[in-house]
Image (cartoon, rainbow, N blue to C red):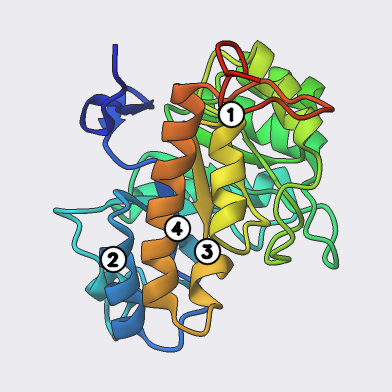
């Protein structure tokens, strides 16, 4: 059966989405530029930092530039360094009416922004019990990915490289191992710098890619948003099509059998 992008939905948290590109809202020069890039990406899930949103809407807020009829808002706990802080921030976002979904971040190191996986697992367990749909940002450790899945996470989101580094996927072997045992979506989160990075993630078999700096930090964020959209689709298409086996030596494109000498 021929693969059809139009019929290939991302199932996440009991919902379905056409787009496999999730995008962030930070680091844009202006809110109107952010709005234009989000629209060009054709993403359906947009993540926002609870701590950076004016929740009482008494002044201009990035939420004024997100069409909630078109985009699903995914609050995140960026800037949290303890499980308690992350739990409190997630609850604040829900109480403010953002969502009962949360991109869970518990940072363990200020310089690398690597996650504190012990605290992350604890916060995941608590928030799942509190009725949240939890999408945890974690390292590329297959053991931790399995523990988060067992704790009730709706997806696991291993980093490709440090947040904002733009280095692309540094350890594809670990991503492959995570994919082998995952029963929930695997979403590469962090490190994507350009379209080829997004395509690699999808070609590995990941269900989606989440990015922010790779788009917002580009010289032309709107053009990069479109490039990322196309790269995610191309990578997914290549994965579903099935690549040829890699070989050490050449194999003639035109068979030699039947050719007169």
Res. 47 in view: no
Q: Is residue 166 above or below residue 202?
A: below
Disc ID at residue 216 = none
The residue wearing badge 3 is 212
77 sits to left or right of 220 = right
Counting other residues with Cα less than 10 Å from the Cα at mark 1, is it few (<14), some (14-19), or many (20 or more)?
few
Residue at disc 3, secondary structure: loop
Q: Residues within 10 Å of mark 3 (few under 14, many from 20)?
A: many
| Residue drawn at the location 62% of the way across and 25% of the way down | 125
Label 3 – label 2 distance at C-alpha: 14 Å
Q: Which of the marked residues, 3 or 1, is nearer the chain's N terminus?
A: 3
The label nearer to you, 2 versus 1, is 1
Q: Residue at x 37, y 47 (%)?
A: 94
Marks 2/4: CA–CA distance: 10 Å
Marks 3/1: CA–CA distance: 40 Å
Residue 117 appears in which quarter of the rendering?
top right
Residue ID for mark 2: 40
> Going by the image, does 24 lie left or right of 140?
left
Percent coordinates x, y for residue 81 in the rendering:
74, 55
Q: Residue at x 67, y 14 (%)?
A: 180
Q: CA distance from mark 4 to mark 1?
A: 31 Å
């Amino acid at each position: 059966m021929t693969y059809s992008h139009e019929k290939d939905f991302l199932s996440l948290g009991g919902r379905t989405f056409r787009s496999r590109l999730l995008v962030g809202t930070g680091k844009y020069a202006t809110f109107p530029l952010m709005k234009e890039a989000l629209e060009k990406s054709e993403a359906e899930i947009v993540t926002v930092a609870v701590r950076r949103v004016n929740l009482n809407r008494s002044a201009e807020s990035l939420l004024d530039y997100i069409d909630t009829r078109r985009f699903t808002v995914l609050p995140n706990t960026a800037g949290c360094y303890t499980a308690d802080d992350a739990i409190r921030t997630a609850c604040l976002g829900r109480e403010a009416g953002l969502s009962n979904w949360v991109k869970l971040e518990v940072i363990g190191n200020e310089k690398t922004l690597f996650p504190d996986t012990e605290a992350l697992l604890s916060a995941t367990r608590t928030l799942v019990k509190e009725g949240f749909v939890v999408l945890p940002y974690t390292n590329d450790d297959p053991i931790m990915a399995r523990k988060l899945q067992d704790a009730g996470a709706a997806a696991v989101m291993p980093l490709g490289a440090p947040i904002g580094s733009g280095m692309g996927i540094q350890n594809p072997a670990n991503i492959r191992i995570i994919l082998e045992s995952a029963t929930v979506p695997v979403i590469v989160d962090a490190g994507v710098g350009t379209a080829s990075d997004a395509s690699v993630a999808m070609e590995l078999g990941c269900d989606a890619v989440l990015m922010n700096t790779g788009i917002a930090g580009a010289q032309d964020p709107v053009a990069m948003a479109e490039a990322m959209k196309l790269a995610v689709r191309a990578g997914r298409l290549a994965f579903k099509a099935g690549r040829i086996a890699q070989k050490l030596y050449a194999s003639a494109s035109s068979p030699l059998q039947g050719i007169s000498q």
